[in-house]
């Protein structure tokens, strides 16, 4: 079975019972050590109680603290607003007012060494998360429409940024947000300023500017919440905190780290005189390059124009015509020579044929004797034995032929000359 409720609409608890129970629960917590930043220290003369406010630097939370004024006066380090301290005490719930307060019995200041060690631990954690990765860095615009500036009111950093930027580019426009840059209210103020400028439609770059100072003075710019806000911002952020040796964590998470506020002003806007000089130089170089190109092309055209083929276009054709005429003359000469040579060879062959032919032999008095065979072509008579008496003969001489009848064999000539006479 479930236990009956402690209270009900019909049986409510009185305020004194609730307050007493809360006081009992808190009392059971016992004495504890608490770390924070002092945002208010109130010590009135002649009172036995000093009132302090202890704030968490990483969150908008605070705790009321009371202590003996002697505890503050005997502290080895000054207990002032903005100091980072560690308190030892016991929480108490005041039933009369319904408030919680820490009654401190010991106060210790956090030394510089401890602060630096904590910053290094936070640096390692942020680096492990990749918040220092160069690939996350956004480029700055060449000429921003407006520059957001987060700095202390009437500070040297504000004057340096404004004067240097306006001297370099007189038309530059600033959206200035003045906030505390040290102390307990610095981080919340800077966070609000960054959020406001990040939402501004005309702000293209934000500058966080502060002059130099001690480690404690620059501590807000190593705050974890501030570092994460810088990374989460959509607008590029330039960190110009302190001087060159100073290196708060905001320098590592920002898109651009400037050595000084003056250096930040030089980075966010161009130098008008330098840009005008660059434009003039580029125009001069462009004009010189164009003139050089035109001169080279003019020389090229002039060279082309003075080439023989363009200076006298018909000269090439004339030379080719002369070459063709010469070649035609040579061809005609060679053809005539070949024809004459072949004509001479033909004449020689003709003469040899005429000399060796039967007609020439007949012209010298010889005759060709043929035996006429009825029903067949005449046959050349080669021997007297082939022409018995009564053989029909056909005798061919130079100017014709005659027929004869063979009479039989006669005696052969006695000598060669006699044989050769017709």
Image (tube, rainbow, N blue to C red):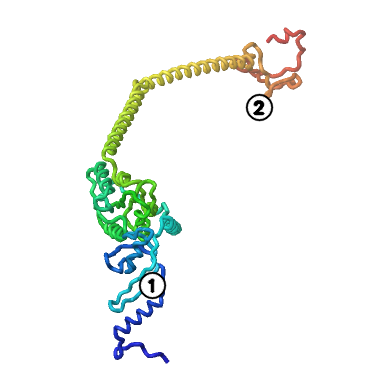
**Residue 219 vs residue 197: left or right?**
right
Q: Nearer the viewer, residue 247 or 355?
A: 247
User: Residue furthest toward the bottom?
Assistant: 1
The tag on residue 90 is: 1
List the residue tagged with mark 2: 377
x, y (%) of residue 375? 66, 30
x, y (%) of residue 142? 30, 46
Local secondary structure at mark 1: strand
Circle 2 residues within 10 Å: few <14, some 14–19, many ≥20: few
**In this rendering, is residue 414 above or below 85?**
above
Local secondary structure at mark 2: loop
Q: Quadrant of residue 191?
A: bottom left
x, y (%) of residue 373? 68, 26
x, y (%) of residue 325? 42, 18
> In front: mark 2 or mark 1?
1
User: Residue furthest toward the front?
Assistant: 46
**Residue 135 vs residue 282: left or right?**
right
Q: Nearer the viewer, residue 155 or 286?
A: 155
Q: Nearer the viewer, residue 255 or 7?
A: 7
Q: Quadrant of residue 128?
A: bottom left
**In this rendering, is residue 282 above or below 396?**
below
First in sequence: mark 2 vs mark 1: 1
């Amino acid at each position: 079975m479930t236990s009956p409720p402690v209270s009900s609409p019909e049986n409510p608890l009185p305020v004194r019972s609730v307050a007493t129970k809360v006081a009992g629960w808190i009392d059971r917590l016992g004495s504890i050590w608490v770390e924070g930043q002092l945002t208010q220290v109130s010590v009135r003369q002649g009172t036995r109680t000093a009132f302090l406010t202890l704030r968490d630097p990483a969150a908008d939370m605070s705790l009321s603290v009371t202590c003996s004024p002697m505890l503050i006066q005997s502290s080895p380090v000054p207990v002032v607003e903005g100091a980072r301290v560690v308190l030892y005490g016991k929480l108490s719930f005041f039933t009369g007012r319904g408030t919680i307060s820490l009654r401190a019995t010991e106060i210790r200041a956090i030394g510089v060494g401890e602060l630096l060690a904590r910053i290094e631990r936070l640096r390692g954690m942020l680096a492990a998360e990749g918040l220092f990765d160069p690939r996350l860095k956004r480029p700055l615009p060449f000429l921003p429409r407006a520059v957001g500036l987060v700095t202390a009111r009437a500070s040297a950093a504000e004057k340096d940024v404004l004067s240097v930027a306006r001297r370099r580019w007189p038309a530059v426009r600033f959206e200035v947000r003045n906030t505390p840059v040290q102390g307990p209210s610095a981080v919340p103020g800077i966070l609000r300023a960054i959020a406001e400028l990040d939402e501004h439609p005309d702000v293209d770059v934000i500058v966080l500017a502060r002059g130099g100072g001690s480690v404690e003075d620059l501590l807000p710019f190593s705050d974890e919440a501030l570092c994460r806000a810088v990374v989460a911002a959509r607008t590029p952020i330039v960190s110009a905190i302190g001087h060159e040796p100073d290196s708060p964590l905001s320098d590592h998470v920002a898109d651009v780290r400037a050595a000084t506020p003056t250096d930040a002003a030089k980075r966010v806007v161009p130098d008008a005189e330098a840009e005008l000089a660059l434009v003039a130089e580029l125009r001069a170089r462009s004009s010189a390059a164009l003139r050089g190109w035109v001169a080279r092309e003019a020389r090229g055209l002039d060279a082309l124009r003075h080439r023989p083929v363009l200076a006298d276009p018909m000269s090439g054709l004339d030379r080719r015509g002369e070459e063709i005429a010469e070649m035609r003359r040579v061809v005609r000469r060679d053809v005539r020579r070949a024809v004459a040579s072949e004509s001479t060879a033909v004449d020689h062959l003709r003469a040899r044929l005429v000399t060796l032919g039967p007609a020439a032999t007949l012209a010298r008095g010889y005759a060709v004797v043929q035996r006429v065979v009825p029903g067949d072509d005449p046959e050349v008579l080669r021997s007297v034995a082939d022409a018995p008496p009564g053989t029909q003969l056909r005798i061919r001489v130079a100017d014709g032929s005659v027929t004869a009848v063979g009479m039989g064999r006669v005696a052969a000539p006695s000598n060669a000359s006699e044989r050769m006479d017709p």
